Image (cartoon, rainbow, N blue to C red):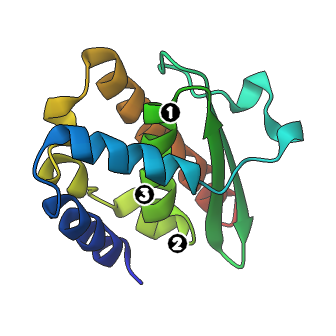
């Protein structure tokens, strides 16, 4: 499945909800299904800088696909990183680097997050793309 297909799936999921309380509940539920980072990877160097909450992100390259695992100490943030892992994990570095991630805007996430959470989301995306770029450069 392409990144764009997964984004479309998420857009359709969010269209089922009438209000933002239901959407937040869905984000929290997504956080519960997040592929969790190994406890030994919950180190300071894995913390995403720019997030108000503590968010750990681990990435590895397997068969030229980036696999992300993550965790957070805040339930909404955990759901947000779960969305990003769902969209970007299991794709090539090039696919991740070139992804537009239009779903964030289309589901209304940017308008309904506090400024600090919005900055955190930008930091997550930036870190995931930087990790993909690092893998791409290693393989050249």
- Which residue: 71% across, 65% down? 61
Query: Left or right: 10 with respect to 73?
Result: left
Residue depicted at x 65% and y 57%: 35
**Mark sitting earlier along the chain (3/1):** 1
> How far separated are the C-alphas under marks 3 and 1?
27 Å
State the mark number for residue 75.
1
- Point out the frontmost of discs 1 and 2: 1
Compared to residue 140, the image places residue 127 above or below, namely above
34 over 80 or under it: above or below = below
Label 2 or label 3, whichever comes before in sequence order:
2
Q: Nearer the viewer, mark 3 or mark 1?
A: 1
Taking 16 as reference, is 78 left or right? right
How far across and down, in percent of the image, does residue 23 sit? 25, 46
Report which residue position mark 2 lands on. Answer: 91
Residue 82: image x %, image y %? Answer: 50, 51
Locate residue 78, reporting x and y percent.
52, 38
Report the front residue among 134 and 70: 70
**Circle 2 crowding by C-alpha within 10 Å: few under 14, some 14–19, many from 20:** many
First in sequence: mark 1 or mark 2? 1
When asked about the image quadrant of residue 68, the answer is bottom right
- The dot on residue 97 is 3
Residue drawn at x 64%, y 39% is 71
Figure check: 67 above or below 119: below
- The front one of 7 and 130 is 7
Give whichever of 54, 31 is nearer the camera. 31
């Amino acid at each position: 499945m392409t990144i764009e297909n997964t984004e479309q799936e998420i857009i359709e999921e969010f269209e089922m909800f009438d209000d933002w309380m239901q959407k937040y509940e869905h984000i929290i539920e997504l956080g519960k299904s997040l592929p969790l980072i190994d406890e030994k990877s919950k180190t300071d160097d894995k913390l995403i800088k720019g997030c108000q909450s503590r968010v750990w992100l681990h990435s590895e390259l397997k068969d030229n696909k980036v696999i992300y695992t993550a965790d957070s100490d805040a339930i909404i943030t955990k759901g947000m990183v779960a969305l990003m892992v769902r969209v970007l994990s299991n794709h090539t570095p090039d696919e991740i680097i070139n992804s537009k991630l239009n779903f964030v805007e289309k589901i209304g996430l940017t308008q309904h997050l506090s400024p600090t959470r919005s900055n955190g989301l930008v930091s997550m995306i930036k870190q995931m793309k930087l990790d993909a770029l690092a893998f791409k450069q290693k393989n050249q």
